[in-house]
Amino acid sequence: MTERPAQRVPNRQLAALIAEAGFSNAGLARRVDQLGLEHGLDLRYDKTSVTRWLRGQQPRGTTPALIAEVFTRRLGRRLSAQDLGLDACAPVYAGLEFAATPEEAVDIASGLWRKDSGSHAELRKIAFTPAGLVVPSRDWLIGRPDERVARGAEPAAARVPLQGRASVPRQRQIDRGPGQRVTAGDIAALRSVGELFRTLDHTYGGGHARQALVRYLEHEAEPMLRGTYGETTGRRLFAAAADLTRLAGWTSYDIAAHGLAQRYFVQALRLAQAAGDRPYGSYVLVTMSRQAVYLGHGREAVQLARVAQQGVGSGPPPVVQALLHAAEARGHAVLGEVRAATASLVRAERALGAARPGDDVPHWARLYDEAQLADEFGHCHRDLQQYRASAQHAERSLQLRAPGFARSRLFCRVVLATARLGLGELDQACALGAEAAQQAMEMRSVRAVEYVRDFERRLEPYRDASAVRTYRDRVAALS
């Protein structure tokens, strides 16, 4: 006797949520397809697919997680695949979520640290998704501040009596059990470690100590975030964790792990919100904007810079305003928008000119000076093919920039080489390019190598010139 196939059980949980969200079957399928596109997936579901899910068929791969995210966005509360009556699967986009609560932010960020500190090489292969920038930046801009981040014993006022029992907290605590008490010294240590890794990154490239930074986040920062602290200490702790997480993203970006870097930036943005630090959130958005510029997504870069400006208003010190306007200029320049780029550069220059020695400048903005702004000008004019202006600003940046910023100096030297090439000064261009190529060999920075390769592509029309042949011989001798 042949066995009849098992009868599928209708998925009433999914049906109830579809009704609550007001989706049609076709509408749900369309939103799942759109979310898939945000993360580089070509899914092509339709209303028939949803009908099958309602009848009990389990969608494959990462689709259950995508469906859950669609409902999370629609209903404004975090839902898992299990909440929808679907089999769970780790989503390929995990880390792009903008957490609803500080507790969830710690869970997502620490999960990212743990995976990255292990042997999960696939994390570094995840693609960058421009559409994945929209929701986090929007949620940061319009999101309400977190009312409470403290962990540990509730204040007495927050407890209510129960008949015949001891009083209990009115709300579920972030705490999952007793943990270390976080002190000012712990936070100072996080800050000091951040400065150490930042110096290594500037000098030797993001690949030099990136894994050590990620392991530090996992083994030191996470236990602190799951420890015990009051409101003021908690805000400072989240701020320090946001800074280290952004740096982990920056070093990932520098080794061309762009999808991973994007996830770190999103989580740094959420941790900054938990810290109540809007200016630092704007800095994270600028970092995301710079990555978008590097990858050629000028429109997204401009939008991120504008969201950053809108999110902090006119309150930040002039140095921060200069940084924000310069980031917008870079996006316009990639798009070839001369007038818009020029206007943003002028605003950046005026803002930096208004800075005074006594200004209260955040630690992350103190390095933004005339050398950095000249570098921004040089890059913008290069992208706009205004080579004489690019050369002038790049030379000024190199004159002003301290030797410790080796990678930034390398980038600027390549910009100057490109400008000299654009002006027809082939010998000087090749000499500068060869210097940059040698420096790139001494760093663990994919971006440094890519800058040099971009210059070499621009040399191709002149490949038979003696200066170019000499350049290629010098570079070949380095390997």
Image (cartoon, rainbow, N blue to C red):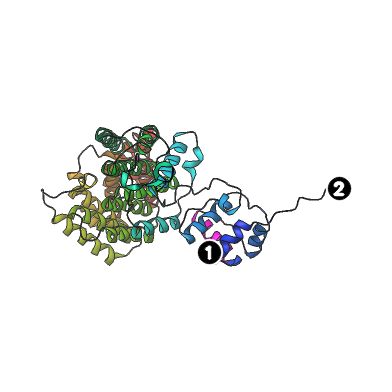
Q: Amino acid at mark 1?
A: Ala
Q: Nearer the viewer, residue 48 or 468?
A: 48
Pick out the residue farthest to the right: 1
The image's mark for residue 131 is none
Residue 344 in the image: state x and y as whole percent. 25, 62
User: Is residue 40 covered in magenta?
Assistant: yes
The image's mark for residue 21 is 1
Q: Quadrant of residue 364?
A: top left
Q: Which residues are magenta?
A: 27-44
Residue 302 in the image: state x and y as whole percent. 33, 60
Estimate the spatial distance between the alpha carbons at disc 1 and disc 2, rounded to whole Å.
Answer: 42 Å
Q: Is residue 116 left or right of residue 439?
A: right
Q: Nearer the viewer, residue 287 or 241?
A: 241
- Residue at image coords 52%, 61%: 34
Q: Quadrant of residue 50?
A: bottom right
Can residue 418 be seen from the camera position used here? yes
- Residue at image coords 21%, 52%: 374
Helix, strand or loop at mark 1: helix
User: Is residue 474 covered in magenta?
Assistant: no
- Residue at image coords 44%, 34%: 117
10 Å crowding of disc 2: few (<14), some (14-19), many (20+): few
- Residue at image coords 44%, 55%: 132
Q: Main secondary structure of the magenta part?
A: helix
Of the numbered discs 1 and 2, the one sitting upstream in the chain is: 2
Please say if 233 is above or below 82.
Answer: above
Q: Quadrant of residue 224?
A: top left
Q: Amino acid at mark 2?
A: Thr
| Residue of label 2 | 2
Cβ–Cβ under 8 Å for marks 1 and 2: no
Residue 393 in the image: state x and y as whole percent. 21, 52
Pick out the residue farthest to the front: 164
